[in-house]
Amino acid sequence: MNTTSLYGNRTQLRYGIPDNLKILYVALISTTFGLYLPSAIIILCVFFTTSHIRENVRYLLFSHMLISDSLQLTLAFILFLLAMYVVFMPVTLCCIIAGISTTTALITPYNLALMSLERYIAVCFPMRHGVICTVGWCNMVITIMWGIAVFPIITELTILSYFVERNFFSMRMICIWKQLQRYNFQITLRFLSFSLSFSIVVLTIFFTYIKVMLVARKIGTKTSSASKAAKTVLLHGFQLLLNVCLFSSTFTETLFRNYSTLAPINFFVFICLPLYISPFVYGIRDETIRKCLSKLIYST
């Protein structure tokens, strides 16, 4: 079986990256991940321990995005360490872990689109916002969102199972999703699903921003809720731009495939950093979350 991974084959992994440089890469990514995870947990503690925030759809969507991003980062970090030290795992287990990680990569843009729609309804249909944007509605939409995100992954793996040799799923491999893409139709399916998803998300954020901005212009004050909502939707667009870096990592990965020492940098810059930055740009900016964080810190 082909055991080539994101960082090259076994020989390249052992000799292509000097041990001291490998330790530096692992220390950098471990440290930043170690700073991110407790911060994410603190923000989630604020959400789960503050009733008026927990019952607000806006913050419910944000906390869901934070959980999804944290899950994706945790799985990506584990797979990174296993690949760096050439640890092989059963193909079946790899399918599960890599499948969840890939699914969560789609959850973030979907979540940003929903957050933009929620702001659009709050500004353009304020009388109906409390009726439409309920906690029950939000939970239902989140469930549908996960179903849509996981569908192409399950389809890809199901079709793969019909074409590979019988002993494929009983073998061991370095767990990288590209290892599971053994046929062109898988690459095509992935490209179409991701392209369609991002196109819908971009159009949704663009539409909601224009609509909210029109309302803000009518009101004509920079301190209005519509003006603040427009800035929030614009921020969602910036977060989406950061999220695009996750998918550009495939291109840069191919570009640096002959330079094994640059592969961990590619992982850090194009996969880790966007996820580190994205939630906190929104969370720390929010006045309500900042106040609750201050109370939590001072109370402890």
Image: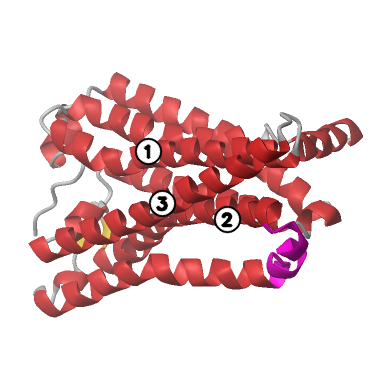
Q: Earlier in the sequence, mark 2 or mark 1?
A: 2
Instruction: Tell which circle, 1 or 3, labels the residue nearer the N-terminal end.
Output: 3
Q: In this rendering, would 179 be left or right of 289?
A: left
SS label for mark 1: helix
Q: Earlier in the sequence, mark 2 or mark 3?
A: 2
Pinpoint residue 167: horizontal percent, then vertical percent. 13, 75
**Relative to the observer, which residue lies in front, 134 or 105?**
134
Q: Position of residue 122 (x, y in %)?
A: 70, 54
Could one spot residue 173 in this view of the protein?
Answer: no
**Residue at which label 3 appears:** 203
Q: Is residue 237 magenta?
A: no
55 displayed left or right of 299: left
Q: Secondary structure at mark 2?
A: helix
Q: Does residue 50 lie above or below 150 as drawn?
A: above
The three-letter code of the residue at mark 1 reads: Ile
Q: Which residue is mark 2?
A: 117
The residue identified by callout 1 is 271
Q: For the residue carrying disc 1, how many other residues have a C-alpha within 10 Å: few (<14), some (14-19), or many (20+)? A: many
Kind of residue sitting beneath label 2: Leu
> What amino acid type is highlighted by mark number 3?
Leu
Outermost residue, right direction? Answer: 299
**152 w.r.t. 68: above or below:** below
Task: Let me know if residue 256 appears in the view.
Answer: yes
Q: Residue at x 44, y 42 (%)?
A: 240
Residue segment shown in magenta = 125-136
Q: For the point 44% across and 32% down, which residue is it?
A: 273
Distance, label 2 to label 1, CA atoms, is 26 Å
Q: Position of residue 295 (x, y in %)?
A: 87, 35
Asked whether residue 130 is drawn in magenta, I would say: yes
**Secondary structure beneath disc 3?**
helix
